[in-house]
């Protein structure tokens, strides 16, 4: 599927198994999501632009090195569950800026109800925006989060949407609305249930991170 990357790493399977299991304790669930976040971060970083600079080695020899200027990257976790991926990404991108968008699901209509948006306006200091949301289910929250980002002046081509679990309906809705966005996920599940949860999925990621 164009613009969609699925992790191909055997360790991701260990994490997915732990996240799916209803018997996994909160501490182990957090650990599994954090580890999976490292793998997702490495995958996402492959899409980042690099620059070149010269350094002098201890042998007094000049070497040309490529690097990522992570101060020009904006992480946007979708509250609550997106917070579970922030630490993993900051491990590799310690100078990245972090903005937050918050929304909750109306369980009757499945609509995303926003309550927070502190994404800064695009003034030319950001090259890449990485939206973090463990679950891309119906796509309602994903589209709303992306609308928040685009309304601040960022182009869809600047955005990577990172999730741990995705469902085909959510992927289709996001790419229909924002065809330039890149999606990175650990797994794609085929369907949603009548409550809009991914099946087989892992349940409510936010609750399992913070309320179990």
Image: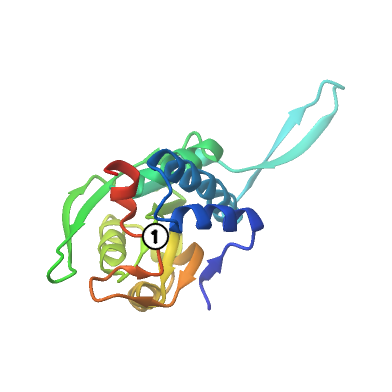
Residue 206: horizontal and vertical position, in percent?
A: 30, 50
Q: Which residue is at a point 45% across and 65% down the rendered structure image?
A: 157
Query: Residue most toward the front?
Result: 23
Q: Which residue is at a point 48% across and 38% down the rendered structure image?
A: 90
Q: Which residue is at a point 33% across and 60% down the rendered structure image?
A: 203
Apparent side of residue 165 relative to residue 61 in the rendered image (left or right): left
- Which residue in the structure is indicated by mark 1? 202
- Quarter where residue 118 is shown: top left
Query: Residue most toward the left?
Result: 108
Q: If the image is split into quadrants, where does the C terminus sit?
A: top left
Q: Which residue is at a point 50% across and 66% down the rendered structure image?
A: 187
The answer to whether residue 180 is visible is yes
Q: Secondary structure at mark 1?
A: loop
Q: Nearer the viewer, residue 29 or 99?
A: 29
Q: Is residue 144 above or below residue 209?
A: below
Q: Nearer the viewer, residue 157 or 187?
A: 187
The answer to whether residue 161 is visible is no
Q: Is residue 157 above or below residue 192?
A: above
Residue 67: horizontal and vertical position, in percent?
A: 64, 41
Which colour scheme appears in the figure? rainbow
The image shows a total of numbered marks equal to 1
Apparent side of residue 107 relative to residue 160 in the rendered image (left or right): left
Q: Residues within 10 Å of mark 1 (few under 14, many from 20)?
A: some
Apparent side of residue 97 relative to residue 106 in the rendered image (left or right): right
Residue 29: horizontal and vertical position, in percent?
A: 43, 46
Residue 33: horizontal and vertical position, in percent?
A: 46, 48
């Amino acid at each position: 599927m164009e613009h969609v990357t699925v992790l191909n790493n055997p360790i991701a399977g260990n994490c997915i198994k732990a996240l799916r299991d209803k018997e996994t304790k909160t501490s182990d669930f957090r650990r599994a999501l954090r580890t999976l976040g490292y793998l997702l971060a490495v995958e996402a970083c492959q899409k980042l632009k690099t620059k070149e600079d010269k350094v002098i080695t201890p042998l007094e020899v000049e070497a040309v090195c490529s690097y990522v200027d992570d101060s020009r990257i904006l992480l946007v976790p979708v509250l609550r569950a997106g917070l579970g991926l922030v630490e993993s990404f900051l491990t590799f991108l310690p100078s990245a800026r972090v903005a937050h968008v918050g929304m909750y699901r109306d369980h009757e209509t499945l609509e995303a109800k926003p309550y927070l948006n502190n994404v800064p306006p695009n003034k030319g200091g950001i090259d890449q925006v990485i939206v973090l949301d463990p679950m891309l289910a119906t796509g309602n929250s994903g589209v709303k989060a992306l609308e928040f980002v685009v309304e601040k002046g960022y182009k869809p081509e600047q955005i990577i949407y990172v999730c741990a679990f995705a469902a085909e309906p959510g992927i289709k809705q996001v790419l229909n609305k924002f065809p330039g966005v890149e999606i990175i996920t650990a797994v794609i599940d085929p369907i949603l249930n009548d409550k809009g949860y991914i099946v087989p999925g892992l349940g409510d990621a936010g609750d399992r991170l913070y309320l179990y």
